[in-house]
Image (spheres, grey):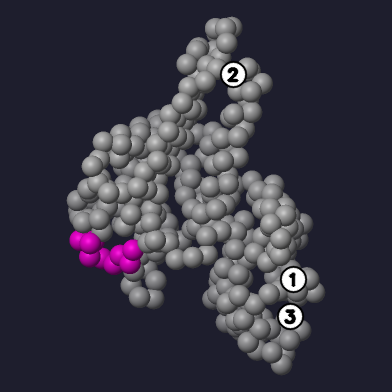
Amino acid sequence: MSTFVNIFDFTRFRKFLAEYQERRQAAEPSFSRTEFCNLLGLPNTRSYFNDVVQGKRVTDNMRERFINVIGLKGNEAKYFEAMIDFDQGKTAQVREAAFDAMMRLNKTPQAIVDPDSYEFFGNWYNSTVYAILEVMDVADDVSELASKIFPPVSEKKLQASLKLMQKMNLVRKNESGFWKPTKDSLATVQQSKSQMVLQFQKQCLELSKQALESKGTESRDMTTFTFSVSKNAQKQVETAAEKFKAQIRHIVTADSEKPEIVEHINLHVFSNIRENNESTVVKRTAKSFEKGLV
């Protein structure tokens, strides 16, 4: 299965099915959507696959057939079933349980860019342009993009950004000639301490400062607070921060509506007392949200 597409790159099962069928047909021309229906045991219902992709409910019996046709095994099969429950669950409890299962089964629910890709992390606007491509239709003429991105970026730099992302296989042109992302989300390896990643994060902090001082009409929500906690509570805060980041990634990738805005989130958790000091640990948590309307 992984020869065609990685199921863990998806949180919407319908999008996964459409991408899988398209990729497999590219390798096996006979694997059309009609043939998919035949393999599902529905030779007289040629529109079934299209109906599912467009929103038709999948029964328990049919989900088993999908698993068999695609050849999903182990955690891949469990993840596929969880994606269906997350989409089709009739109650909030069912959907929440499916969400938890997806988080547990998918250890890296994001597209990971190698932190050694110095060019990409050398400029903050690369990841911003990547996100904006979901909101705007951008072709080779980037003048409109240059007029809307905040803070301002020259057209020359935006052209270079698109060229870089194309080289890294992060974007590609669709049938209409517009650049679009090839993955649902973008993140760095959590454990990475690359100096280039640190430089990228410093640039993001500067973006927060500019958003805070901006007199524009863009919405923003910035909160900073300091508090004292025990060692045990400190670990709980850090665990909660990790869960929050995972939830944000899933919300973004599970969003089935057309993107309309680009948001930038900086989340910082650090101690105001050095580790070798045995006194009470004080934690400072700074949350900054930049909501750039495009």
For the point 72% across and 54% down, which residue is it?
93
Q: Nearer the viewer, mark 1 or mark 3?
A: 1
- Name the outermost residue toward the bottom: 44
For the point 63% across and 17% down, which residue is it?
230
Task: From the image, give the main secondary structure of the stretch colored magenta.
Answer: loop
Q: Which residue is mark 1?
A: 63
> Which callout, 1 or 2, points at the residue further toward the start of the chain?
1
Residue 124 quadrant: top left
Left or right position of 186 against 79: left
Residue 148 quadrant: bottom left
For the point 26% across and 59% down, which residue is it?
145
In the image, which residues are magenta? 136-144
Question: Measured from the top left, where is residue 83 in percent x and y?
Answer: 67, 61
Q: Nearer the viewer, mark 1 or mark 2?
A: 2
Left or right position of 47 against 215: right
Residue 140 quadrant: bottom left
Label number found at residue 156? none
For the point 43% across and 29% down, which residue is it?
224
Is 292 above or below relative to 286? below
